[in-house]
């Protein structure tokens, strides 16, 4: 029974950490998409202004606005960036926390867990 609880705790911590990293990656990706959208909007606005002024001097031959090619963000690159942001100090703190938890009494450890994990 104790082994099962310890395994649940380990899985919960692992899942929580993975979800946090996933949220960070998604936030970074969302920020990237927003920045690209703002850039495209800016280019489009500049293109529209340019067409208005050029339309009076040009009789025909309008060219379509084509933004420069944008490389799609690779998820693995995003993960690598997120891992770069994790400092050695944070890793050491996490290891120390895990070591302390491994030395706790089971009842003491169970008190630190959110109630839903024990259901």
Image (cartoon, rainbow, N blue to C red):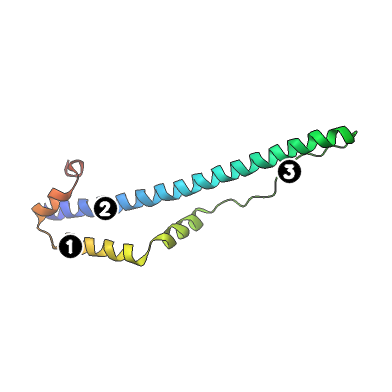
> In the figure, 11 relative to 64: above or below?
below
**Residue drawn at point x = 21 percent, y = 52 percent:** 9
Q: Is residue 60 left or right of residue 104?
A: right
Q: Is residue 97 left or right of residue 28?
A: left
**Discs 3/2, front:** 3
Question: For residue 114, which numbered disc appears in the image?
Answer: none
Q: Which residue is mark 1?
A: 100
Q: Which residue is mark 3?
A: 66
Identify the image quadrant of the C terminus: top left
Q: Secondary structure at mark 2?
A: helix
Q: Which residue is mark 2?
A: 13
Q: Residue 56, percent across and down? A: 87, 32
Q: Secondary structure at mark 3?
A: loop
Q: Residue 73, percent across and down? A: 55, 52
**Residue drawn at point x = 51 percent, y = 46 percent:** 31
**Residue drawn at point x = 44 percent, y = 62 percent:** 84
Residue lying farthest to the front in this orientation: 53
Q: Please identify the quarter of the rendering in which residue 34 is found.
A: top right
The answer to the question of whether label 1 and label 2 lie on touching residues, with beta carbons closer than 8 A, is: no
Marks 3 and 2, how far apart in space? Answer: 47 Å
The answer to the question of whether label 1 and label 3 lie on touching residues, with beta carbons closer than 8 A, is: no
Marks 1 and 2, how far apart in space? Answer: 14 Å
Q: Please identify the quarter of the rendering in which residue 53 is found.
A: top right
User: Dot 3: within a 10 Å radius of its alpha carbon, few (fewer than 14), some, or many (20 or more) residues?
Assistant: few
Q: Earlier in the sequence, mark 1 or mark 2?
A: 2
Give the camera-side residue of 117 and 26.
26
User: Dot 1: within a 10 Å radius of its alpha carbon, few (fewer than 14), some, or many (20 or more) residues?
Assistant: few
User: Dot 2: within a 10 Å radius of its alpha carbon, few (fewer than 14), some, or many (20 or more) residues?
Assistant: some
Residue lying farthest to the right in this orientation: 59
Q: Earlier in the sequence, mark 3 or mark 2?
A: 2
């Amino acid at each position: 029974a104790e082994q099962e609880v310890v395994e649940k705790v380990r899985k919960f911590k692992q899942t929580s950490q993975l979800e946090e990293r996933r949220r960070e990656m998604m936030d970074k990706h969302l920020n990237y998409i927003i920045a690209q959208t703002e850039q495209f909007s800016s280019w489009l606005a500049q293109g529209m202004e340019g067409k208005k002024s050029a339309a009076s001097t040009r009789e025909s031959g309008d060219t379509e606005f084509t933004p420069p090619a944008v490389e799609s963000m690779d998820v693995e690159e995003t993960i690598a960036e997120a891992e770069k942001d994790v400092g050695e100090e944070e890793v050491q703190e996490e290891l120390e926390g895990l070591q302390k938890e491994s030395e706790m009494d089971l009842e003491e450890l169970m008190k630190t867990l959110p109630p839903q994990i024990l259901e």
